[in-house]
Amino acid sequence: MNDRNRHYDRNRPRQGSPGPEGFSDGRLVEVHSQIARDKQEPAQGFSMTPILVVFLFCALGFWAGLYLTRNSRGFSASAFDLNAPVAFASAGPVVFEPDAAKGQTLYLANCAACHQPTGAGVPGAFPPLVKSLWVAGDEKRIIKIIIAGMAGEVEIDGVKYNGNMPNVGVALKDAQIAHIATYVRSAWGNAAEPVMDASVAAVRKEIGARGQYSPKEVLDAHPLGN
């Protein structure tokens, strides 16, 4: 080994030799390890979640699941369908129930533009439905008019109306027509029986895909007051 290499070796700290403060390398490692063990971890922001909070969250989750199970109607989309029956049988087929509240929503969407939300109609054009004999009595009368429409002049309380009612029922389901008819027959002073979807289905089958009725055709088959 030449002299240059020996000079380099003399300047290297030997293992176990004292450090600049009188500590050997091993002692320095030992002291550092002791300090690391004795140092306390920061406590701010790292506290344990109180057991009461955990319990409350668990109780809330249980209550939410129970509420959804009891009130979601089996998580069925029909819960938000205006055409869906409101009563669910525990066994067997679902029983239809006419719903005037659903009928009002459907009436406002399909009929109120002409007959008005108040049922007052439009003078000279669309007859009123308020305390009307046209919607009371035989339910087939209003069902036929909703399904097929009616065109021609009618006179109510001395006022003539010559509007053209379209066949709005063609685009509606039987249950929807039943809801509308039930609402109209029970609103604005009317007091007629509710209409079932089976009745609408029977009338639809009876009249088929015919055109609009004339007032005379309707009154000949279903006179007012009956």
Image (tube, rainbow, N blue to C red):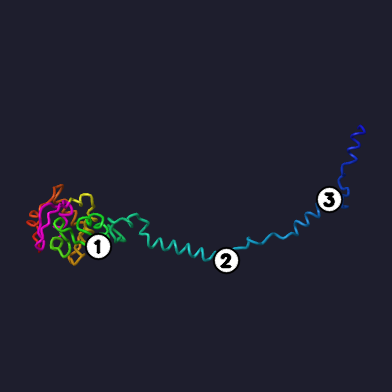
Q: Position of residue 75 (x, y in %)?
A: 37, 56
First in sequence: mark 2 or mark 1? 2
Give SS at disc 2: helix
Does residue 95 appear in the picture of this structure?
no
Residue 212 drawn above or below residue 10: below
Label 3 with label 2: CB-CB less than 8 Å? no
Identify the residue under disc 3. Answer: 26
State which region is magenta. 139-165
Viewer-nearest residue: 99 or 196:
99
Give SS at disc 1: helix
Residue furthest to the top in view is: 2
Label 1 with label 3: CB-CB less than 8 Å? no
Identify the residue under disc 1. Answer: 100
Q: Position of residue 49 (x, y in %)?
A: 59, 63
Which amino acid type is shown beneath numbered disc 2? Ile
Query: Residue at (20%, 65%) from the top-left corner?
Result: 188
Give SS at disc 3: helix
**Magenta stretch encompasses residue 162:** yes
